Amino acid sequence: MIRFAFMINRIDGMTFEEFVTHHRDRHAPLFTSIPEAQQYVKKYTVSHPVTAESYPSPAYDGLTEIWFESRADHDAFFASKNYEELNW
C-alpha cells in the first residue's frame, strides 16, 4: 500500500472558510467522481487543521491523503484521460 499526503494552502484572497468549502464540497467530490478513482484509489480523505489557543499555528490549510495498492495503480490513475480532463 502506498499513501500520499498533500499538505496544501489556499490561494491569496481566499478565506480559510472558503477554502474548506471548496476543498470538501467541490474538489473532493470531483476527484472521486471519475471512474479511475473507483478502480485505483483505495482510500481518499481531506481534512483541515483545527486551531486552539494552546496549539501552534498550522503550517497548511488542508490535507489530502490518497492511498493506492501499488505504484502502478498510482501511475495509471494520474495518467488517465478522465483525471487529466478534470475541471478543477
Image (cartoon, helix red, strand yellow):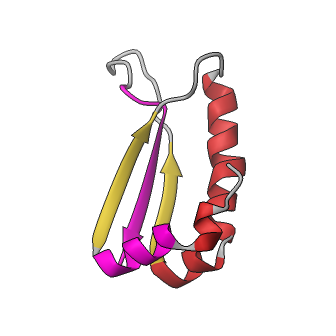
Q: Quadrant of residue 72?
A: bottom left
Indicate the quadrant containing the N terminus: top left, top right, bottom left or bottom right. Answer: bottom left
Q: Is residue 65 above or below residue 23?
A: below
* Residue closer to the observer: 54 or 42: 42
- Residue under the point 39% across and 72% down: 74
With 23 as the anchor, is 6 left or right in this view?
left
Residue at 41 percent across and 30 percent down: it is 60
Q: Position of residue 47 (x, y in %)?
A: 50, 46
Please say if 24 is above or below 39.
above
At a point 67% along the width and 59% down the height, the residue shown is: 86
Q: Position of residue 76 (x, y in %)?
A: 44, 77
Q: Is residue 86 left or right of residue 38?
A: right
Magenta residue check for 44: no
Q: Which picture quadrant has residue 15?
A: top right
Residue drawn at x 46%, y 24% is 51
Q: Is residue 69 magenta?
A: yes
Q: Which percent across, then down, holds residue 65?
A: 42, 56
Residue stretch in magenta: 59-79
Q: Is residue 65 above or below residue 38?
A: above
Q: Which residue is nearer to you in this view: 37 or 44? A: 37
Q: Is residue 28 visible?
A: yes
Residue 70: tell me if it is visible.
Answer: no
13 or 58: which is nearer to us?
13
Residue 4, horizontal then vertical, whole percent: 34, 58
